[in-house]
Amino acid sequence: MNGPEDWDRYGPQDPEEPGHPCPGRGERPRIPSPRRPAEDQGPLPDVRPPRPDESPPEEQEVPTDQETPGGRDAPQEPRAPEPRRTSEDAATEKDGTTDQDPAGAGLPEPPHAVLKSLLGAWALAACSPEETAAVEAHLTDCAACADEALRLRDAVGLLHPADSLDLDPLLRSRVLENCLGRRPARIPVPEWAGPYDAETAKLDALLRDMGESEWRAPVRLRWFENDREAVRTTTVAGVIGHLMSVDGLVATALGLPDPLGAEVPEDAPTDPTERTLAYWRTGVHEESPLATREPWREQSHALIRTVAFAGRGVAELAVPYGDFRLPLRDSLLERAFECWVHAGDIADAVDYPYEAPAAHHMHGMVDLAARLLPSALAVRRRAGLAAPPRRLVEAGTPGRTLHLEVEGSGGGHWYIALDSPGALGTPDRTVAHIALDSVEFCQLAAGHVSPEDAAAGQHGERDAIREVLFATASLSRL
C-alpha cells in the first residue's frame, strides 16, 4: 500500500492516479547513473570546427514542464550547467560569427598519462593543434613533464634535418653510367673465349695508370725464326698497336671493321707480321701513344660482345693467319696467349710484376700448342729444317709418338705424333719423353727461350726430342 511517506518520496504508486510519472505502467521511475567523463574514454576528442557551408546541427527540443509526463514534480535527468556567457560571447553573437577554439577550449583536460605519452610527438612537432595546446597547458603545471619535454626537445635538436624520401629520378641512370664507365657490363661469354677476355682485362689494368713517359718506354720483342732468335725493339704503344693489328684478323672474320682501315697491306692482308709492320709505318703509336689504348680496348670489347651474341656455330668460323687458318675458338685462345706474352714484355719494360694466366686458361694454351706441334713438324720438314719421317703412316693410325709431360699450373700429358700430322699419338708407340714446367713450355712456344736452353727432362730418341723442341719454338712469331 501507498502511504504518505511513499507519496512524498516516489509520488503516486498507482498508475491510474494523477501525477504518476508513467501512466499505465506499475513500475517505479529509475534515476539514471552518472555518465563517465569524456577523458576516460580514450584519446582526446577530435573537435572539428564547422565548415562555412555546413549548417549547425539542429537542437533537440526539450519538452516543457507541461509536456513532460508526470508534471513538474516528475524526476528529471540531471543536466550539465551551462557555461557563463561573457561580454566577448555576446559581441560575437551580435556580429553573427562564431569562433571555434582550435585548442579545444572548454573541453575537459586529458589525464596525465595521455599528455605524458604525447611529449615525444610534441617534441617532434607531430601533434595536432588541439594536442599541442593541451600539452603546453599541462607543462605549465607539471614540473616532471616539463623537464621531460625539455630533454626531448634538446634530443630532437641533435637529429639530422629531415630529408625527402623521394629519390632523384635520374639517380639510377647516373649510377649505371658510373659503374659502366669503371667496368663494362658483364655478358655471358663462351668458355672458349674466357682466356681472351681475362687476359685483355689484365693487360688493360696494367695500362690504365701509365703515363706518357711509360708508354714510350722501350720494349724488347723476341721470337724464334729460321732456328735463330729474332729481336725487335718498339715502345709500349707499339706493342698495343701490334696486338690490335693482329686482333683485326679476328674482327674482320666476324664482320667487324678492320683497325688498319686503308693501311691493310695489299700483298699480304692476312699475314700477322705484315699487318704489324703496316701499322708501325703510320707512326700513330709514336705521335700519340696514350691514344693507342682506347681503340685496342674497344676492339677487344667488340670481339667479346660479338662472340657472346653470335651463338654456338661461330666457334668453328675460320680465321686466316697467312698460310694457315684456325677455328675461331683456337684463334681467340692464341690471341689470349700472345696478349699474356706481350703483357709480360711490357711489365718487364716498366719494372712491374705480372701474373701468369689462371690454371684452366694455361691448360688451354698448352693444349693448343701441343695440338699444333704435328703440323709444325711437317712445315719444318718441307722447309728442310727437320729430318724426314722414318716411316709414313696413314691418317688416323698410330705412329711413332713423343710423350710431352707439362708440369705445374695448367699442365697435363700429351702424346705427339712424330711421322705425320694425321697420325695418332699413343702411349704404346712412345719413343721419347720430355718433361717441362708449364711456364717454361709457354716461354719456349713464345720464342723467349731457345730450344737448347729449355730446362727439359729428356728421355728416349735424341733426334725426336730435338725436333719437338725446335718445332715448339717455331710456333712463335712477331
Image (cartoon, grey):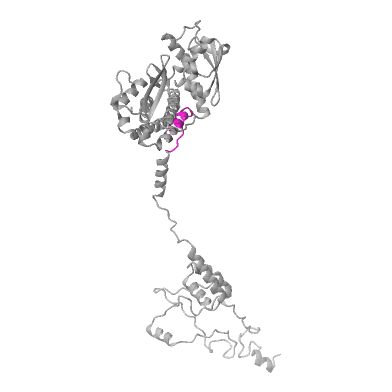
Kindly give the residue lying farthest to the right in the view shown. 1
Quarter of the image with the N terminus in it: bottom right
**Is 386 situated left or right of 427 in this image?**
left
198 in the magenta segment: yes
- Taking the spot 54% from the left edge, 12% from the top edge, the residue there is 401
Rendered image quadrant of residue 435: top right
55 in the magenta segment: no
Rendered image quadrant of residue 340: top left
Q: Which residues are magenta?
A: 184-200
Q: Position of residue 131 (x, y in %)?
A: 50, 72
Rendered image quadrant of residue 317: top left
Judge whether 180 appears above or below 364 on screen.
Answer: below
User: How many marks do you count on the picture?
Assistant: 0
Q: Position of residue 127 (x, y in %)?
A: 49, 69
Q: Nearer the viewer, residue 151 or 252?
A: 151
Work out whether residue 137 can be spotted: yes
- Taking the spot 45% from the left edge, 14% from the top edge, the residue there is 376
**Is 24 situated left or right of 129 in this image?**
right
Q: Nearer the viewer, residue 419 or 170?
A: 419
**Is 307 situated left or right of 78 in this image?**
left
Judge whether 17 appears above or below 452 on screen.
Answer: below
Work out whether residue 396 can be spotted: no
Q: Position of residue 81 (x, y in %)?
A: 53, 85
Judge whether 324 appears above or below 75 on screen.
Answer: above
Quarter of the image with the C terminus in it: top left
Q: Position of residue 316 (x, y in %)?
A: 44, 22
Judge whether 220 appears above or below 375 on screen.
Answer: below
Kindly give the residue lying farthest to the bottom in the view shown. 4
